[in-house]
Amino acid sequence: YTLTYHQFMDYFKEEDNRRGFYICYRDSIAAAVMNAATDSGLKVPEQIEVLSLVGTKYAYIVRPRLTAMSINMQEVGKRSMYMLTDLLNDELVDKTARFEARLVLGDSTKHN
């Protein structure tokens, strides 16, 4: 969080960077981007829109509420352990896994 926050505080100093849509790989990074934007005088979502690819409980406690993808992380962990066990036993056949994800709309994007 801290490193991303400071990087975006510097990034938002440039006039060309004061608008945009940011896709973050997790909620804490999205929160850092939104806080840096707000602390730089920018409005979320009017000027800066933010989406998290892995929504957790933090998507509900940051303000504005974060738009995020919801993935069943228990299922991800379970499948990962099965794959690791297969790999260790030299039985790994399927090297990919698909997980259902759904978009949970928050207030950090315009929704259009």
Image (cartoon, rainbow, N blue to C red):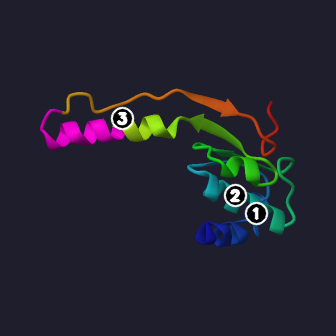
Q: Based on the picture, tell me whether residue 52 belongs to the magenta stretch.
A: no
The residue under the point 67% across, 68% down is: 5
Residue 14 lies, in percent from the top left, at 75, 67
Q: Nearer the viewer, mark 3 or mark 1?
A: 3
Q: Which residue is mark 3?
A: 79
Q: Which residue is mark 1?
A: 35
Label 2 element class: helix
The region drawn magenta spans: 80-91
Left or right: where does residue 90 sit relative to residue 56? left
Quarter in which the N terminus is drawn: bottom right
Q: Name the residue type under label 2.
A: Ala
Quarter of the image where one finds residue 29: bottom right
Q: Name the residue type under label 3.
A: Arg
Q: Do the residues under discs 2 and 1 have CB atoms within 8 angstroms? A: yes
Q: Nearer the viewer, residue 21 or 59?
A: 59
Quarter of the image where one finds residue 82: top left
